[in-house]
Amino acid sequence: MCKRALLWTILVTSILVISVPDSAQETALGLRVVFEAKHTISSPLRDMARPAASTAAAQMLPRLSTGLAITSSQPGPVAQAPSGSAPPISALLNFQGQSSNHPVPPDTNLSVGTAQVVQIVNVTFAVYDKKKGALLLGPSLIHTIFTALGGLCGTTDGGDPVVLFDKLAGRWFVSQLAYNSSFTDNHACIAVSTSSDATGTYNVYDFPFGSNRFPDYPKYAVWPDAYYGTFNIFGGGKARSFFGARACAFDRTRMLNGQAAITICFQQPHTITSLLPSDLEGATLPPTGAPNFMLSLADSTNLNFFTFHADFSDPSSSEFTGPMLIPVASFSEICASTLACIPEPSPGEALDAISDRLMFRLAYRNFGDHEPLVVNHTVAGGALAGVRWYEIRNPSISPIVFQQGTVVHPNIDFWMGSIAMDHIGNIAAGFSASSTSLDPSVFLVGRVPGDLLGTMQGPTVAVSGTGVQEQSFNRWGDYSSMSVDPSDDCTLWYTQEYYKVSGIRNWTTRITAFRFNTCS
């Protein structure tokens, strides 16, 4: 160990000694600093990852409720029926992703790099060539990335996976959870590739969350100073007691270099749930020293806004501020009491709307004269579910809603969306669509900067479902993802689940790439 690394380890150890141990922090709020349990480097995935068995872990992953329920006595005033005209986009690729015989829900998401697309689901990942959609690697069990760590990270697949491409460094970020059956030993397993090749080697990390602290529904984002992550912390018997959201910053610089790393976290009270960190899009960085921006649902007319600045040289100087309320048009959750109310044709079951939180990702851009954040969530659009979306501007100064809308249909439920913006300000959202006569399908909407504020064109159908989900615990989602190709900052990639054949847990996924005709 070099002297510099030794000194750094002593510094972190000193910090941890004066910090309250995580096991004693059941109700403690505020700052905590946690050192990795272990880090190492993986073998090249192309040499070790093998296709997953077709019977891989057919099970239900935990659905833990934070208890948040938001209702409004006022109808949503920004509901917008489909325009009837397709958005001005050109389809580039549209192909089947991973599928079948995995846990429910699939937690489908992807990211796109310079030459590859990585899709990750419960509990496998796959690497595709982004020019033709050809499968390059997998599907393989996610824990094979972490095999060199041993322990729970290296041997189990706990789900809630996330994949991101760090455009600033040209690296891949992969994470999933690992935990024992009683939720008394819980870990966040994080891998950062050593190159832009997703099939190569990774710096792999095991971050412990302590005894009886289950970090549910993790969401991550890339920011210049850190990888930011958010979690809903549960404890008690079988992790059924909700303690509140936790926001963490992982030392990006050291993880890119394969060095020992810490995470700086701020625990929130149980009234704060499902935080979403801002994920950088485009080539222009945020203003120098800008904190990461985070949002959550507050009540029927407000979002919570937070800022997080991590200081890895002096963690005690890190700052987490908020909540500040951002007023929005009134909304209500759908399925607030039942959780599952999205219909399918018979013999399908009612599907979970997950209407109590913002949906992955919170996408950030810096245009110089303004900084937009775009995000969406599912709301009650009358009697049916709709996709509420926001463009929030100038978070570095004073965040304000620039535009907002709710995409609804008179006969079809729209839900489980993801949204992103390209480099000229076009916005696209993808989501699930279902009704008593429509098998769950994948729809897209979009807008160009000249459109009337708060409106979307479309929808257009990315893929029509030809089956329904049966007896699968009502689980759907829990999220999807829309990402922007870093090579041209125009091409948008979306992935979502659907069913080709009716059945139990035999979902499949779709990957589609498209571009607005005005983007070049």
Image (tube, rainbow, N blue to C red):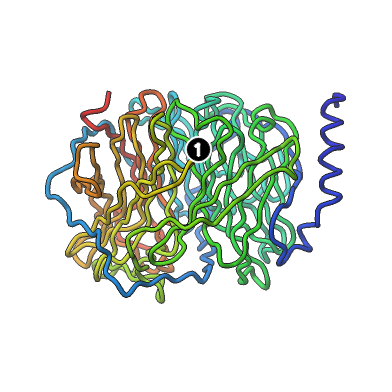
Q: Check disc 1 and give the amino acid type.
A: Leu
- State which quadrant residue 489 falls in: top left
- Residue 423 seen anywhere in this rendered image of the structure: yes
In the structure shown, which secondary structural element does the residue marked by tag 1 occupy?
strand
Q: Is residue 395 left or right of residue 169?
A: left
Indicate the position of residue 163 as horizontal and vertical percent values. 51, 40
Judging by the rendered image, the residue that carries numbered circle 1 is: 164
Identify which residue, 232 or 74, lies in the foreground: 74
Is residue 117 among the parts visible in the rendering?
no
Q: Is residue 143 left or right of residue 381?
A: right
Q: Estimate the x, y position of residue 117 in percent, counting from the top left.
A: 43, 32
Front position in the image: 504 or 179: 179
User: How far across and down, in percent of the image, does residue 296 sit?
Assistant: 48, 57
Q: Name the residue: 40% across, 27% down.
A: 129
Indicate the quadrant containing the C terminus: top left, top right, bottom left or bottom right. Answer: top left
Residue depicted at 70% across the width and 47% down the height: 207
Say which quadrant the N terminus sits in: top right
